[in-house]
Image: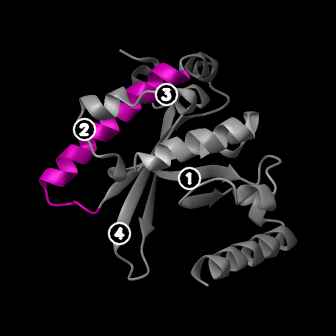
Amino acid sequence: MTILAVADDKGLVEQYIGVFTDITNQKTAEEELKKMAHSDPLTGIANRYSYNIGQLVLRQVCRDLKTLEQFGFNKFSLAVNVSPLQFLQDDCGIISDENVPARFLELAVTESTVMLDAKKSVQRLTELKSIRFKLSIDDFGTGYLSLSYLRRFPIDHLKIDRSFIQSIDQFAELIDFLYLDLTEEYE
């Protein structure tokens, strides 16, 4: 039994489900998160095994996607948070093994992960984008990624951290940036 499974059985894991909808309010994606409470002693152990746990989660997400596809959900995608080590890995073996088209997966990496080596992250995100993965940066606003640098990342979604939105001036700056970026893209 994995650390995550033991913690889940003991009620130490909280599950969060985020639903993404399009402009017509049609459900287009879902994100499932399982997080252990930070005060729990198992958290440190789980962090050491984040790559292995991440691989188990990714395999399960791939299997869930295949099941969804069998029930006719062929425009559905699932977002999965990837650890820094998973992000840097060059192989997509689990996805190939499970025979899931990359377009059904959204890989979410944290702002702190992409800022470990921003230049390498741009290259890695570009590689993943060429395979047709959907990409997002999670926890935006918790690190030092500037809005101007953000434009270099080929991402589909930006998941803004609550702490960032609490400062309305920064949020207004972000909205202006996104508006200008979209305007330039469609001119």
The reply, left or right, for residue 83 in relation to residue 146 is left
Q: In the image, what residue occupies the spot 46% across and 20% down?
A: 52
The residues tagged by marks 2 and 3 sit, at their Cα atoms, a distance apart of 21 Å
What residue does disc 3 label?
A: 90
Looking at the rendered structure, the secondary structure element under dot 2 is helix
Name the front one of labels 3 and 1.
3
Please give the range of residues in magenta.
50-75
- Count of number-bearing discs: 4
Q: Are marks 4 and 1 in contact (CB under 8 Å)?
A: no
Q: Earlier in the sequence, mark 4 or mark 1?
A: 4
On residue 63, which mark appears? 2
Quarter of the image where one finds residue 64: top left
The residue singled out by tag 4 in the image is 27
Disc 1 is placed on an element classified as strand
Residue type for callout 4: Lys
- N-term-proximal mark, 2 vs 3: 2
* Sequence order check, earlier mark of 4 and 2: 4
